[in-house]
Image (spheres, rainbow, N blue to C red):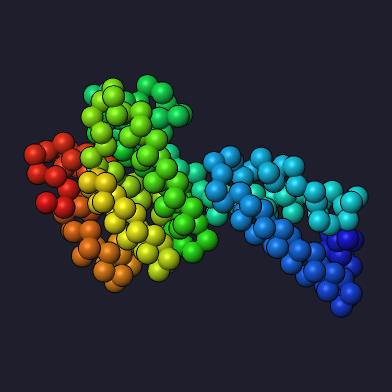
Amino acid sequence: MRCCICSGVRPGRTEVAAACAWLREGLLFCVAAAEAWSGLDEEPTAFCDMAVPLGHPHDSKGDKVTISFAKILLNSIQPGIEELGRFAGTDIFCDISQYPMAIRIPGILIIRVNAGTLCFANASFIRQRIMRWVAEEDELEENAKEKIHALILDMSSLINIDSSGILALEELHKKLDALDIKLGVANPRWQVIHKLKLGKFVDKLGSGSIFLTVTEAVDACLAPKMLGA
């Protein structure tokens, strides 16, 4: 497809219609790809790198735009989820996969979701991924260490949440509670905590399970009085 903007030519109806059709096909492709990969743990960018461009086969600019847009969309639908550990002797928590020297807290799973929004597009994926992580950690610690008794969700990256995101948190809370695992929320932004209050999630979780920092949440878990007690 010829790029009228780059060439300085004012686009006509034909060019605009072609551009809209091209973008629509790209969106449908991205959504289909996300649905196909929603149950897998592989990085979505790997799929985008293999994607066949939907524009003209010789339009390198269109190819790059399509793939870049697909990466952005899929990363929003399937955001990165990290397990955090603490640097010895500090109150700094970081991604264990990036900093192997970070120490896991026995019996406590600390998760950070690298997404700006918890919404209808990614809420189900995030909830399912966290529950799989809990199951995997329980299997690893069943014989070696104490089982997980608390999960701390670091919300420092979230700037917004919708009703689907709140519903996913409620379902996560119920499933964890059935496993006798307490849920704590750390470092939520004011927009997020405001919506959690409006959605009655704070009442269901308990105000004692909301913390300003991950450190405070960990200290509460390690104290005799557990989260939400």
Depth check: give the residue in front, 22 or 140.
140
In the rendered image, residue 22, in percent from the top left (x then y), is placed at: 80, 64
Q: Which residue is drawn at 14% across and 45% down?
A: 226
In this view, which residue lies farthest toward the bottom? 13
In the rendered image, residue 68, in percent from the top left (x then y), is placed at: 69, 50
Q: In this view, does 128 lie above or below 146?
A: below
In the rendered image, residue 13, in percent from the top left (x then y), is placed at: 87, 78
114 lies left or right of 103: right
Q: Which residue is drawn at 45% across and 43% down?
A: 81
In the rendered image, residue 221, in percent from the top left (x then y), is placed at: 18, 40
Q: Quadrant of the N terminus?
A: bottom right
Residue 87 appearing in the image: no
Q: Residue at x 41, y 62 (%)?
A: 165
Residue 216 appearing in the image: yes
Q: Quadrant of residue 193?
A: bottom left
Depth check: give the residue in front, 109 or 134.
134
Q: Is residue 44 above or below residue 23?
A: above
The mark total stands at 0
Q: Residue at x 55, y 55 (%)?
A: 77
